Image (tube, rainbow, N blue to C red):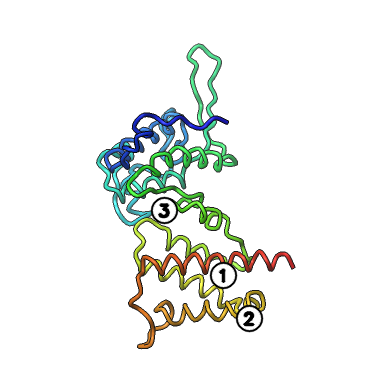
């Protein structure tokens, strides 16, 4: 397969990241294309039959109910702040559906529209592909994940770990904590407290399997819990190290703990 062509400015290395104004315009174009093709008839309503969608009479009111604040309808996207834009991108991903359009054979060629819920994942994949082209060029680089969350673009080596983390099979004590940890750490606007909470969630999951974990990884188990208990993650005491560089240590802790959990589950399933 031939490599994608690189144009003059790309070859010269003078491409700059997209700014908010660019991203708003790109999003509005993507949104309008999907809307025109009836991907949002269940959510926004059916324009051919004047039927109301999930949002009812008001997109703004729907947002107040679902995310506790008012956001203008996507047709007003050029006015969005960054948090509005990211929220709506996630909201549309959650509510997109695959359209079914039937055109009659009469002289008027009228259309009837509905959706195919069984193909929702196909619609979501298409939407993600389209919007990620622009998100990845915006600012420091962002992407819409398969789980429907906007996050900073992951380094290539971490993509498979995050997107395909092994499932233990205990929803309450393990799996929900791992999902929550990834959401907390990778979400748009996550701060150091969020990231520490994410590491703590993985630590709590590992605590539940600690005995078996020790058998699998030996003395490394003690090292992991030493980090949890002495770097201000789970307990507070005067002897803890709290003056470390968060930008260095928190990513290291998060990905070390997540990869340890992932490796443990995969090894356990080989038994």
Q: 110 or 131, which is in the foreground?
A: 131
Q: CA distance from mark 1 to mark 3?
A: 25 Å
Q: Secondary structure at mark 1?
A: helix
Q: Crowding at label 1, few (<14), some or many (≥20) Cα neighbours within 10 Å?
A: few
In which quadrant is the C terminus drawn? bottom right
Residue at the outermost front position? 12
Closer to the chain start, of discs 1 and 2, is 1
Q: Secondary structure at mark 3?
A: strand
Q: Which residue is mark 1?
A: 172
User: Which residue lies at the image location 53% right of the left edge and 36% below the top edge?
Assistant: 98
Q: Which residue is mark 2?
A: 211
Q: Crowding at label 3, few (<14), some or many (≥20) Cα neighbours within 10 Å?
A: many
Q: 149 or 73, which is in the foreground?
A: 149
The answer to whether the residues at label 1 and label 2 have Cβ atoms under 8 Å apart is no
User: Which residue lies at the image location 32% right of the left edge and 47% below the top edge?
Assistant: 139
Place of residue 28 in the rendered image (x, y in percent of width and height, measured from the top left): 34, 35
Give the quadrant of residue 77: top left
The answer to whether the residues at label 1 and label 3 have Cβ atoms under 8 Å apart is no
Place of residue 222 in the rendered image (x, y in percent of width and height, measured from the top left): 55, 81
Place of residue 81 in the rendered image (x, y in percent of width and height, measured from the top left): 27, 47
Q: CA distance from mark 1 to mark 2?
A: 18 Å
Q: Crowding at label 2, few (<14), some or many (≥20) Cα neighbours within 10 Å?
A: few
Q: Which residue is mark 3?
A: 151
Q: Is residue 68 left or right of residue 225?
A: left
């Amino acid at each position: 397969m031939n490599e994608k062509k690189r144009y003059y400015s790309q070859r010269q290395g003078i491409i700059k990241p997209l700014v908010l104004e660019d991203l708003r315009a790109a999003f509005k174009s993507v949104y309008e294309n999907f809307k025109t093709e009836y991907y949002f008839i269940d959510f926004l309503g059916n324009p051919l039959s004047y039927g109301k969608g999930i949002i009812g009479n008001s997109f703004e009111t729907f947002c107040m109910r679902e995310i506790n604040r008012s956001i203008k309808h996507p047709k007003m996207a050029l006015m969005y702040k960054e948090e509005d834009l990211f929220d709506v991108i996630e909201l549309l991903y959650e509510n997109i559906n695959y359209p079914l359009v039937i055109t009659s054979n009469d002289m008027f060629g009228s259309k009837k529209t509905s959706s195919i819920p069984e193909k929702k994942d196909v619609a979501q994949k298409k939407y993600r592909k389209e919007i990620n082209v622009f998100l990845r060029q915006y600012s420091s680089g962002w992407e819409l994940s398969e789980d429907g969350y906007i996050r900073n673009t992951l380094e290539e080596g971490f993509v498979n770990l995050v997107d395909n983390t092994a499932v233990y099979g205990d929803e309450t004590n393990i799996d929900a904590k791992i999902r929550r940890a990834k959401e907390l750490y990778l979400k748009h606007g996550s701060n150091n407290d969020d990231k520490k909470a994410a590491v703590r969630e993985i630590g709590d999951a590992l605590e539940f399997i600690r005995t078996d974990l020790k058998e699998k990884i030996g003395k490394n188990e003690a090292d992991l819990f030493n980090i949890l208990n002495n770097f201000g993650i789970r307990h507070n005491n005067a002897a803890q190290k709290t003056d470390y560089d968060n930008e260095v240590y928190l990513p290291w802790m998060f990905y070390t703990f997540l990869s340890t959990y992932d490796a443990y589950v995969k090894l356990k399933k080989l038994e």
